[in-house]
């Protein structure tokens, strides 16, 4: 079982941008400093995650959660009823939210949870920052419920593995969104839908695949800035801003990574698209990105952003 010394070492590793696996009551999470875009990118790389899906920010208490997003009275009611515990709430990001846009997959919402496992809570308090923590397993593999599962599958991709015994719940958290069309159940999990509805006092809809999603990957043109995007551009044309990569970065101030580092590029992607779009430019030319590793997810997001707009 993790000792206070182990927990402090893990907190220090998180603050340094390293990955830490730790127990929650649901499954073991692969933790990274949520405010550090490059650390968040390393989570996707370690999991071999096929796309930049939103990650849940874990915090030690409701007060810390309320500083990250805009909670409606109903969202606060669920927080009061189920936190600490296996419920994650999706709410609009606060204007000054410090969590990396990569963790939100470029969306204007944020998923937040307060876990109930004592080791997780002590780690979050010691870290002093929100921590993203998807399940600590390669993407598509069975979620880990013991520290040994993590060590077997992720090996040296994790700086520290905190052992907190077997996870009591064993399935991921229930996810409920409180956005413009909410509340909606986005994922079944550790708290049954009926218990959520009992607290709210009314039935809630479950997210359908045909409805407007609150997670990326379900609509072709879902990441589009106001500006039109031209991909695989070796150089900008007249009137275009240029988003460079590697050697193709000498056409303006914006580059995903001057050194061609895909982790740095993933960490910068959404931030730079927002920054360039805010200038009011009509078109953005984007340098070619290698279609390997995190480059696959970067290209996926860019293709969606460049897709023809629907009316």
Image (cartoon, grey):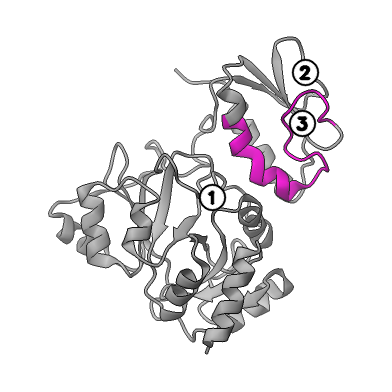
- The residue shown at (41%, 77%) is 117
Q: Residues within 10 Å of mark 2 (few under 14, many from 20)?
A: some
Magenta part of the chain: 248-274
Between 232 and 207, the residue placed more toward the observer is 232
- The residue shown at (36%, 64%) is 189
Res. 236 mark: 2
- Tell me whether circle 1 and circle 2 mark residues in contact (CB < 8 Å): no
The quadrant where residue 9 appears: bottom right
Residue 61 percent across, percent down from the top left: 35, 65
Horizontal side, residue 226 vs residue 272: left or right: left
Between 197 and 37, the residue placed more toward the observer is 37
Secondary structure at numbered mark 1: loop
Res. 103 mark: 1
Looking at marks 2 and 3 on the same chain, the residue that comes earlier in the sequence is marked by: 2
User: Which residue is label 3 attached to?
Assistant: 244
Residue 311 percent across, percent down from the top left: 44, 17
Q: Residues within 10 Å of mark 1 (few under 14, many from 20)?
A: many
The quadrant where residue 271 appears: top right
Using the image, determine if residue 102 lies above or below residue 305: below
Horizontal side, residue 250 vs residue 38: left or right: right
Furthest toward the top, the residue is 238
Using the image, determine if residue 169 lies above or below residue 72: below
Query: In whole angstroms, how far apart are the C-alphas of marks 3 and 1?
Result: 22 Å
Secondary structure at numbered mark 3: loop
């Amino acid at each position: 079982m993790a000792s206070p010394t182990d927990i402090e070492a893990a907190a220090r590793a998180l603050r340094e941008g390293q990955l830490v696996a730790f127990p929650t009551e649901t499954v073991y999470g692969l933790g990274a400093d949520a405010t550090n875009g490059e650390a968040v990118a390393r989570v996707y790389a370690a999991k071999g995650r096929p796309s930049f899906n939103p990650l849940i920010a874990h915090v030690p208490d409701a007060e810390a959660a309320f500083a990250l997003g805009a909670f409606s009275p109903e969202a606060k009611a669920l927080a009061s009823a189920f936190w600490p515990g296996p419920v994650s709430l999706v709410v609009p990001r606060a204007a000054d939210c410090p969590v990396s846009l990569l963790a939100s997959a470029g969306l204007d919402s944020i998923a937040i949870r307060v876990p109930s496992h004592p080791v997780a809570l002590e780690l979050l308090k010691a870290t002093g920052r929100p921590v993203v923590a998807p399940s600590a397993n390669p993407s598509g593999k069975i979620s880990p419920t013991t520290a040994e599962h993590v060590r077997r599958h992720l090996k040296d991709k994790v700086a520290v593995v905190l052992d907190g015994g077997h996870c009591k719940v064993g399935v991921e958290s229930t996810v409920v969104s409180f956005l413009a069309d909410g509340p909606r159940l986005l994922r079944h999990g550790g708290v049954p839908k009926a218990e959520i509805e009992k607290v709210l006092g009314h039935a809630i809809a479950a997210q359908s695949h045909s409805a407007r999603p609150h997670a990326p990957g379900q609509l072709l043109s879902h990441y589009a800035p106001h500006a039109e995007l031209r991909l695989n551009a070796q150089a900008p044309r007249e009137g275009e801003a240029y988003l460079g990569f590697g050697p193709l970065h000498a056409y303006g101030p914006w580059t995903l990574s001057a050194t061609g580092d895909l982790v740095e590029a993933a960490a910068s992607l959404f931030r730079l698209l927002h920054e360039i779009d805010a200038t009011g430019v009509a078109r953005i030319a984007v340098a070619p990105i290698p279609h390997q590793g995190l480059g696959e997810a970067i290209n996926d997001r860019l293709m969606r952003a460049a897709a023809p707009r629907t009316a």
